[in-house]
Every structure is written in structure tokens, then in C-alpha cells.
Amino acid sequence: MKHISIILLAWLSILNQTGQGLYACKNAQISLFSTAPIEDIAAKTSSGTSVYNSNTGDLVFSLAINTFKFPKSLMQEHFNSDYLESDKYPRATFTGKVQEHPDLTKNGTYPITVTGELNVHNVKQNRTIPGNLTVNNGVLTMTAEFMVKCVDHHIEIPRLVFHNIAESIKMNVSATYTAAK
């Protein structure tokens, strides 16, 4: 937890160009799902951290890979040791910019597009991710659903279990932000 707080504070200081418009999330919910002929794989975490600067559109996310929880402990073990190698590559990050500038003083749901760099398994990929930003009395919630191809991040799937794991993983992200103080 201390490591996460240090990262969040560093991002706050980097993003805080004007002293206003900063929003933080300490418990972003992220789920992954893959369907394959033999078995579906699903996992969830609510340990993502994020900072959003509404003045500049800058958005950063960080997630400890080993916080994903699976329904089966063996899936979780293989995910961390064999595929994502979370001891070697402990974090996934996203650094980008929200392209639109919705009026955060008005309640509503706004479509947004975020462009930036997704770093998983120490492999960086440029991404454009569509999503929504919901404003409710000063509280912001960003949601997105997107696919991540294992091959794009050099995540190897052994031939022996190729039918157990899909080549693309569906990611769902939901982060609720409050004004940073």
C-alpha cells in the first residue's frame, strides 16, 4: 500500500500544473475475461490507482498485477507465475490523455476517448480507448471496455494450454474519482 501511495503522490505532483482540476481514485475496479473452448477465465481487482487532471486531460493508471483474484487458486497461480510473470513485471500502467473536455459542473454521462500508452509485461503499446465519463455532483466515474491481445505484450501461451486461454482478453475498467486535496 505504501508503494501505491508514493506513486499516487508522484503523479499528483507531476500532473498538478495549475493546482486545480485534479481527481484521484485509489480503488479502480478492473476485470478481465477470456473465453476459450475448454474454460472461461475471469478475474477482478479493486486495487487500481489513477489520477486525472481535468484541466489538461492527463490520465494515469497503475495496477499491481498480483491483485487480480480468480475463482480458482490454480488459475491465479498460473496467471502470475507463467503468463504475466508478476514477480518480474509487477505493474501494469497506462499514461494518456482524455481527448474531450466535458463540463464537469453538469451532471451527465459523456462519451470520451483516451489515447496513450498501455504498459503490460514491460511491453508498451499505443492505444486509443473509448469510454464514458459520468459526472454526479462533483464525483467522476470513468468506464471503459477494451481488448488486449496477449501477443501484443509478449505474453506467451504454451501450445499445451492453447485451447484453455484466448488470444485476446476483454478488460473492463471502472474508476470513481474525487477531487484531490
Image (cartoon, rainbow, N blue to C red):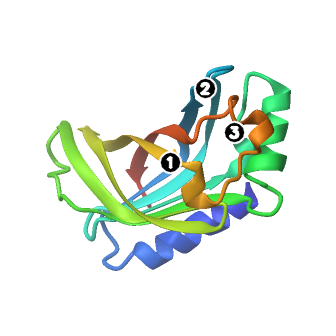
- Point out the image quarter for the N terminus: bottom right
Q: Indicate left or right for 130 with 50 as reference.
A: left
Look at mark 2 in the image and give the residue it sits on.
36
Q: Position of residue 154 (x, y in %)?
A: 64, 60
Q: Indicate left or right for 122 with 28 as reference.
A: right
Q: Give the label on residue 68, or none.
A: 3
**N-terminal of the two: label 1 or label 2?**
2
* Three-letter code, disc 2: Ala
* Three-letter code, disc 1: Val
- Point out the image quarter for the C terminus: bottom left
Label 3: how many residues lie within 10 Å, few (<14), some (14-19) or many (20+)? some
Look at mark 1 in the image and give the residue it sits on.
148
Furthest residue toward front: 159
Q: Secondary structure at mark 2?
A: loop
Label 1: how many residues lie within 10 Å, few (<14), some (14-19) or many (20+)? some
Q: Secondary structure at mark 3?
A: loop
Inspect this view and state whether residue 82 appears: yes
Nearest-to-viewer mark from 1 and 3: 1
**N-terminal of the two: label 2 or label 3?**
2
Q: Position of residue 81 (x, y in %)?
A: 84, 48
**Mark 1 to mark 3 CA distance (whole Å):** 16 Å
